[in-house]
Amino acid sequence: MGEQASVHGFEYDLMQPRNSERLVEELRDQALNVNHLVNNARSLSFLAMNEFGVAARKDFMAEYLMDVIAPYELSTALWRSQPTALRTITNISSQYGVVAATPALYDDHARQSPIQYGVAKAALNHLTKELAVRLADDDVRVNAIAYGGVDGRTDEAFKARYSKLAPAGKMLAEEELPGPLEFLVSEQSSAMTGQIIQADGGWTIW
C-alpha cells in the first residue's frame, strides 16, 4: 500500500519581515520537507488606480513586495534550509509580465489595466532566471508560468474582445491551468530551468 496522503496547513503573512524564515523554521521543527514550491499570490487591493490611471506609490510597492520580494525570500529561505529536499520552484506569472497590456481590450485601459501588475510580473520572470542560475548547483529547477486570461472572471463583452485578440480564439478554461504546473514539477521537465512557459492561448506570439 502507498503512503497515506496528508495536508499540513500554516498561516503566515509573508508581506511581513522575517515571516518566511519563521515558516521555514516551523517546517524544520515539524520535520517536514518541501520538494516543490509554488509562488502564487494575488491582492486586488494593490491594483488601485486613480482617476488619471496612475498608481499610488504604496500600491506599486505593495504589489512588488507581494510578487517579487516575498517569493524571493521564501524561495531562498527554503533553499538554505532544505537544499537536498527542494527540487522545483514555480512562480505564477502572467502574459502581462511578457508583453504590455493591449489597450483595445479595455473600455478604460489606463484605469482597468494596473501598470504595477505587469511591471511586478516582469520582475518575477527575471527573478525566475536569476534563481535558476543561483540554485543550479543544488539541482533545484526554477521556472515560471505566464498564464493568459481565464474564462469566467469577466463579462461577455470583455470575453468577446479578448477572444479576437488571442490566436486560440478564446480565454483559458480553468481545467487548462494545472497542466503546465504538473509538467514543471514532474521529471518529464528535468531539462527545463529558468524558463517562462507562456500558457496563454498564443496571446504573446503576435
Image (cartoon, rainbow, N blue to C red):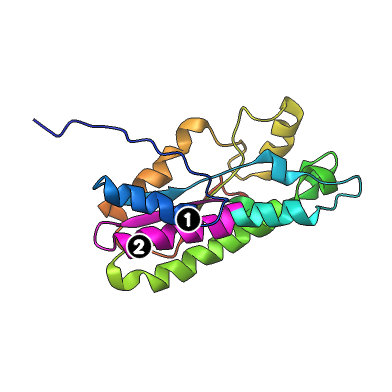
Instruction: Tell whether position 167 is magenta.
Output: no
Quadrant of residue 171 within the rendered picture: top right
Where residue 48 is drawn, which disc sits there?
Answer: none
Location of residue 45 with respect to 190 vertically, above or below: above
Q: Residue at x 57, y 58 (%)?
A: 68
Q: Is residue 205 visible?
A: no
| Residue corresponding to mark 2 | 79
Front-most of residues 101 and 137: 137
Location of residue 93 with respect to 156 vertically, above or below: below
Marks 1, 2: nearer the viewer: 2
79 relative position to 99: left or right: left
Q: What's under tag 1, amino acid-wise?
A: Ala
Q: Residue furthest left?
A: 1
| Residue corresponding to mark 1 | 144
- Helix, strand or loop at label 1? It is strand
Calculate the distance from the C-alpha at mark 1 to the C-alpha at mark 2: 17 Å
Which residues are the magenta region?
66-93
Q: Residue at x 51, y 32 (%)?
A: 174
153 relative position to 59: left or right: left
Locate the C terminus and report the quarter of the image it occupies: bottom right
